Amino acid sequence: MNNKSKNFYITTPIYYVNDVPHIGHAYTTVICDTIANFNRWLGKDVNFLTGTDEHGQKVEKSALKAGIDPQRFTDEVSKSFFNLAKKLEINNTDFIRTTEKRHKKSVIELWKKLEENGNIYLGKYSGWYSVRDEAFYSEDEINEDKDGNKIAPNGSELEWVEEPSYFFKLSSWQDKLLKFYKDNQEFISPKSRYNEVVSFVNKGLEDLSISRTTFKWGIPVPDNNDHIIYVWLDALTNYISALNYTNSKDNNWKTFWPANIHVVGKDILRFHAVYWPAFLMAAGIEIPLKVYAHGWWTVDGKKMSKSTGNVVSPDYIIDKYGLDQFKYFLLREVRFGQDGDFSENALVKRVNSDLANDYGNLAQRVLSFIYKNNEALIPNKGTLDKVDKDLLYAMDNIKDKIINHMNNYKITDALEELWLIIRKSNTYIDEQAPWALKKTDLERMNTVLYVLCSVIKNVSLIAKNFIPIGANKILDQLSINKNKREYANFYDELISGTKLSKPEGVFPRLEIKE
Ligand code: ME8
């Protein structure tokens, strides 16, 4: 690995503090954590950033409604996202808040750079604005609801805004953006989203209003405090302010920029795939390698919303069904990039079939058999038959495929691949039937169990990036040292005669509990 490919930088969106964390936020965070874990496992130096977006009209309104001043309000609500990260036991390296000094400094610096390069001018904005999306919409995007109110394509309410405003010369970046997309076809994933963005930019870009004057909660424009910097310009900068971009000598900046991947929901693709690269180009900063837009979760077939009362709390699901179970469902149920539907029934079904019946059962039946019949010791390897070699070869092959899938962010494919070897191993144990060999051929029984332990070890080394708690428990039961669980340990041979700890079921069957 050369130095650049040894480092890996991944980000979640920074979440608005006006909302309570729900499974949608948890999803993006879990996806990023898994990708981060996997890359760390491969031996890379990983920087994984998440955080909260705390400025803007929407947050100011929510603070007003709650009757508290915005700083106190954001301090409190930011904590709930910080606590979600803790509850999910993610391995983030940083948590950024846009109200922090380090962030404000970078936003001001970026603004000045854009101004110096002639990309900002003062004008007047009149048009439609959605406070919910913190976004401007052009006339051709606007619809009307049944009462004749103007609404955005996603249904959010619009208000007419007319005020002095600074503009970013987005229109002059249209051709450069199109060229950039053409030269970097991997910049936006999935492909359907890439096409969507290209066609949006092809239609023509208007200059972007990047300051507001009708509220105060944000970062003032340098030398003109009447203006507050547009919350998206402020928020997007988090990805570089966390690396201390204002200090070009900072090691984090030199090591981790450009980011390998920004993971976002499809709702905020335009900001990340059009505005962000335009700002960066205009400021002479390198553009990230990829923006991945994932799909949208509904709940029991309906859009999640406070008014419908169907917002699902991750804490509730984790306490009821378990953290690995929740993560596995999110990662496996829906192909990364596509929409999905959350229901407790689907979660229970998925967990019972894949975790309890397949993986958990494989580990439990092998380990408890050894515990009872081989004095809890890793058996002798003996001589491998073709069928043993085939299984070990398949494991090796699948490991390579999984690495390839994960390097291409195909998380669901990676899990499908891992389950192929788990199911193959369950078939192998049924066919080799160590319980029968116990009576006829102890040497062969030992070999079969040894092969199974090797596969369970390697499956768990990979699985711990996705479902760390259970996979690490299985590795504990196999007496694999905690610091021997990296990719580099994949080819470590198990040592016959090693004492195993008492096996315990790791993924119990779930029942729907009312
Ligand atoms: O947009 N399904 O913050 P936000 C899937 N502050 N993902 C969902 C989801 C759902 N139903 N609901 C939310 C913002 N998400 C800005 C971002 S970044 C510089 C600024 C996830 O709190 C998804 O990742 O509205 C979505 O993009 C993000 O939460 C939006 O979070």
Image (spheres, rainbow, N blue to C red):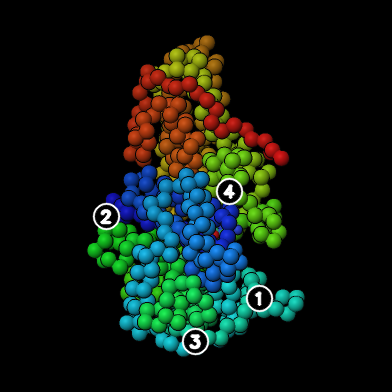
Which marked residue is nearer to the observer: mark 2 or mark 1? 1
Q: Earlier in the sequence, mark 1 or mark 3?
A: 1
Q: Residue at point 57% right, 36% down?
A: 355
Q: Residue at point 62% right, 33% down?
A: 509
Quickly name the residue at label 2: 3
In this view of the protein, can residue 113 be seen by the observer? Answer: yes
Quickly name the residue at label 3: 164
Classify 176 as above or below 35: below
Quickly name the residue at label 4: 314
Quadrant in the picture for residue 169: bottom left
| Label 2 element class | helix
Q: Say which mark, if any, is on residue 161.
A: none
Amino acid type, residue under disc 4 in the picture: Pro
Instruction: Give left or right: position of 325 versus 174.
Output: right
Q: Earlier in the sequence, mark 2 or mark 4?
A: 2
Amino acid type, residue under disc 1 in the picture: Ile
Amino acid type, residue under disc 2 in the picture: Asn
User: Between marks 2 and 4, how big is the CA–CA gap?
Assistant: 37 Å
Quickly name the residue at label 1: 151
Percent coordinates x, y for residue 57 in the rendering: 54, 72
